[in-house]
Image: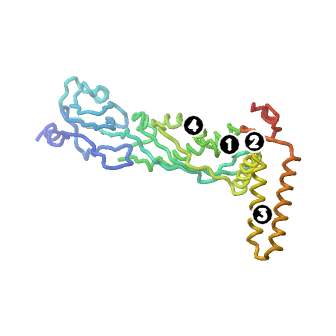
Amino acid sequence: MGLFSFLRNNTLKSIEWLDNTKDTIVYRFPMDGRSIMFGSKLTVRAGQVAIFVNKGKVCDVFQEGIHTLSTSNLPILTQVLALPFGFKSPFFSEVYFVNTKQFTNEKWGTSNPVTMRDPEFGTIRIRAFGTYAFRAEDPVTLLRELFGTSASFETGDISEYLKSVIVSGLSDAIAESHISALDMSSNLNEFNETIAARIRDKFHTLGLKLVNLVIENISFPEEVEKAIDARTSLGVIGKDMDTFVKYKSATAMSDAANNPNGAAGTGIGLGAGVVMANMMKDSAKSKPSVKYCPKCGAESKSSSKFCSQCGHKF
């Protein structure tokens, strides 16, 4: 039996990939020593791209559809193999399928705390975590930059690197924005966009597209969280000190009424409640009215039109 007869009997008549996984990005079709015949059928399903590679050189790319292989739709491979036009004998090549669907709900998080300089609390360390989604945007670049010659390439093979890219973008965005911890925690959506804009180009250089990035939570040290809660409480109190005084007075009277010491305890409790309420009310009157800058958090007089620290217009 001649060489061409042997090759014809050992050729692939149909090439396709039925993806039954959730995380495979690139799949190399198993040739197992078999050759490809011009006239063979190549099936590229929705959400896939097929790429022919010869000796490490990326050749022809096929989009979704059913393709009958010929020298006309394999021009680069034909040129690399120096095949004459209309050549019909078997040939050898590798075929890679690239999954172009979205890979969603990928997790990311800071393995170590990120240091930031806060205008109010000084140097603090924060942690953050969330999810992201991506897909293969440029399959050829993906093969050249990441895949190599493996049999398959999955999301787990690149997840750690992509996490480091996101955390690096988070650190850079924090350093350049000079945003306060108070503003950061209350503006996660805006901060999301800032980080996503910084790292999209890094995904692009790998042939990937960052589809979505979500910061689910940013956590601060316990003492900073307490300070944020206190600042929030002060903001509420400043808006309605009278209501706060009445509330504290009512609480004092309620506590006194539940005092097991009887009438004496009740009198003491009432007296203490009234004294405390009066002290707080007098304190509120003596303390000049202030407001806090929404940009830097600095304290300014309520009559001020501009922040005394950053110049922000109220």
Type of the residue with mark 4 = Glu
Q: Disc 1 or 2, which lies upstream in sequence?
A: 1
Of the residues shown, which amino acid type is indicated by label 2?
Gly
72 over 186 or under it: above or below: above
Mark 4 packing: few (<14 Cα in 10 Å), some, or many (20+)?
some
Instruction: Tell me the CA gap for discs 3 and 1.
Output: 35 Å
Mark 4 lies on a secondary structure that is helix
Left or right, 149 with respect to 237, comes to: left
Write the residue at 20% across / 32% down: 38
User: At x 69% / y 51%, what residue is drawn?
Assistant: 125
Disc 4 versus disc 1: distance between alpha carbons? 15 Å
Q: How many marks?
A: 4
Disc 3 crowd, CA 10 A, few/some/many (<14, 14-19, 20+) = many
Check residue 297 in the rendering and tell me which mark sits there, or answer none.
2
Q: Left or right of 205: which side holds 88?
A: left
Kindly report which numbered mark, 3 or 4, lies closer to the viewer in this rendering. 3
**Residue 269 position by quadrant:** bottom right
Question: What's the distance in space between the residues labelled 3 and 4, CA to CA?
Answer: 47 Å
User: What amino acid type is highlighted by mark number 3?
Assistant: Ala
The residue under label 3 is: 252
Q: Are marks 3 and 2 in contact (CB under 8 Å)?
A: no
Q: Where does label 4 land, which residue?
A: 193
Q: Height in image: 257 above or below 176?
A: below
Amino acid tagged 1: Asp
Nearer-N-terminus badge (2/4): 4
Which quarter of the rendering shows the C terminus?
Answer: top right
Q: Nearer the viewer, residue 179 or 149?
A: 179
Frontmost of labels 3 and 2 is: 3
Vertical order, 244 against 311 (above or below):
below
